[in-house]
Image (cartoon, helix red, strand yellow):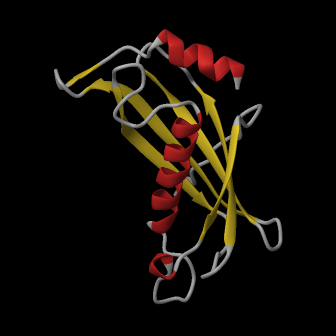
């Protein structure tokens, strides 16, 4: 079976630190496979907030996640601090990809690499929307 490969962006434009909580741990004693998506969601919210946006309001439209891919690279444990670095790529008329790199703050190992496909969405009309030019402009300033 072919493995997913996620290339890192040329530059990261946002960083944040998140704790691995007890609810993120599975029966194997390490971070559960679904927990990394929840942590990436929090990192994405913090990124948008740093630009004065929310998932429901980016220049009057919202965002939805169209797809996600994860490469698990190392274990993480309760109490670990994961340093999330975010970058964007593959911008198009309707969205972009956000690439996340999660690094263990204890040993510097890459724990996971993720990509989420983001599409802009008008929640009032329930339709895909074009990516706001002002958002693109803020990205280029980051």
Name the residue at 57% across, 24% down. 90
| 79 shown above or below 107 | below
Residue found at the very far right of the displayed protein: 107
112 displayed left or right of 118:
right
Q: Position of residue 131 (x, y in %)?
A: 43, 16
Give the quarter of the image for residue 110.
bottom right
Q: Position of residue 80 (x, y in %)?
A: 67, 75
Q: Which residue is at the front of the view, 33 or 131?
A: 131
| 93 shown above or below 75 | above
Residue found at the very far front of the displayed protein: 52
Q: Which residue is at the front of the view, 26 or 43?
A: 43
Name the residue at 64% across, 80% down. 79
Residue found at the very far top of the displayed protein: 133
- Total marks in image: 0
Q: Where is residue 9 in the image (x, y as percent from the top left)?
A: 71, 35
| 75 shown above or below 65 | below
Q: Position of residue 15 (x, y in %)?
A: 70, 47
Name the residue at 52% across, 36% down. 48
106 displayed left or right of 123:
right
Residue found at the very far left of the displayed protein: 125
Name the residue at 40% across, 18% down. 94
56 displayed left or right of 108:
left
| 129 shown above or below 49 | above
Quadrant (top left/top right/bottom left/bottom right) for the C terminus: top right
């Amino acid at each position: 079976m072919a493995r997913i490969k996620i290339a890192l962006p040329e530059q990261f434009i946002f960083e944040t630190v998140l704790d691995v909580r007890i609810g993120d741990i599975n029966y194997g004693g390490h971070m559960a496979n679904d927990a990394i998506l929840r942590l990436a969601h929090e990192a994405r919210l913090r990124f948008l907030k740093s630009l004065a946006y929310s998932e429901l309001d980016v220049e009057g439209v919202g965002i939805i996640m169209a797809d996600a891919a994860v490469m698990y690279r190392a274990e993480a444990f309760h109490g670990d601090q994961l340093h999330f670095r975010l970058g964007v790529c593959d911008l198009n008329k309707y969205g972009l990809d956000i690439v996340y790199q999660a690094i263990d703050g204890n040993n510097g190992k890459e724990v996971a690499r993720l990509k989420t496909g983001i599409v802009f969405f008008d929640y009032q009309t329930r339709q895909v929307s074009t990516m706001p030019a002002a958002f693109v402009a803020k990205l280029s300033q980051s």
